[in-house]
Image (tube, rainbow, N blue to C red):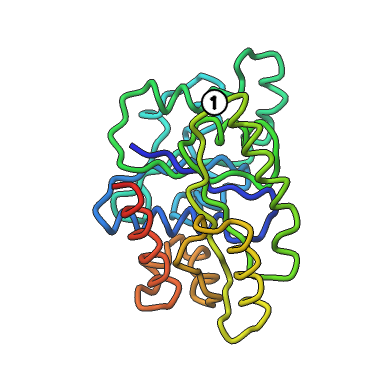
Amino acid sequence: MKIICIFNQKGGVGKTTTAVNLAASLGKAKKKILVCDMDPQGNTTSGLGVDKQSLEGSIYDLMIGQKTIEEVKQETSAEKVEILPSNADLSGLEVELLSVDDKHKILRDHLRKEELDYDFIIIDCPPSLGILSINSLVAADSVIIPIQCEYYALEGVSQLVETISLVRESLNKSLEIEGILMCMFDGRNNLSLEVVEEVKKHFKNKVFKTMIPRNIRLAEAPSHGLSILDYDKSSKGAKSYEKLAKEVIRMNK
């Protein structure tokens, strides 16, 4: 079982889109998937067809020790994908855990101690660096960093890598960078090509070969509660996430 966290403290870079569609693509490839939505906005939850307004249990209940994974997990609109759903309740967690010992290890303890039968666990982090993101990084084996193909793309990336190094040093020695994922790529645009070159210079062989294109169908899918594979499987967006899933499976053989 491999636990992969999707992380970038910058918002709007394709983090949730990647969590939803990578999970769905791995599921289509006959892998059994659990998604952990650690973002209080709950966009991964609704993007996989789960109504975040009417949850009987959420990842918040798991984090405060009131429910188990078995009690919280739900089926989603994607084949072979289950989710620990999230909603706004999760935003109060930081305060509630102030006096708790080992508060950074709560998610890891649940994922490691409960007997789980998944090929991959995908964690979607909030776009910030608080207790929720640290819990996610401590629980993970590796991190996928989505980067948007735009002028300011590399701004904040060195801070992000620094954060990963700090977590590795003090809380999770085995944390690796799974790969850098270039999102919203437009091959006709010189800027996109320059950003990709710059990122490759910086991260060398850590950049995924697959790049996620700018694609209107990708933007439309979440409002239908469907992954891109279930919304429009012939779109460029669907094909690129299927390619990414194959790349991730190959790397983890």
Mark count: 1
For residue 213, above or below residue 225: below
Q: Nearer the viewer, residue 53 or 68?
A: 68
| Quadrant (top left, top right, bottom left, bottom right) of the N terminus | top left
x and y, in percent, of residue 212 in the image: 50, 69
x and y, in percent, of residue 159 in the image: 73, 46
Which residue in the protein does label 1 denote?
63
x and y, in percent, of residue 149 in the image: 64, 70
Q: Secondary structure at mark 1?
A: helix
Q: Residue furthest left?
A: 30
Q: Residue at 66% of width from left, 83% of height from top?
A: 190
Q: Nearer the viewer, residue 50 or 244?
A: 244
Looking at numbered disc 1 in the image, what kind of residue is underneath it?
Met
147 horizontally vs 143: left or right: right
Rendered image quadrant of residue 28: bottom left
For residue 28, above or below residue 45: below
Q: Residue at 57% of width from left, 74% of height from top?
A: 185
Q: Residue at 66% of width from left, 20% of height from top?
A: 97
Rendered image quadrant of residue 14: bottom right
For residue 200, above or below residue 74: below
Count residues near mark 1 (Cα–Cα under 10 Å), then give few for <14, some for 14-19, many for 20+. Answer: many
98 horizontally vs 75: left or right: right
Q: Residue at 44% of width from left, 44% of height from top?
A: 122
191 horizontally vs 112: left or right: right
Q: Kindly tell me whether residue 217 is visible in this rendering.
A: yes
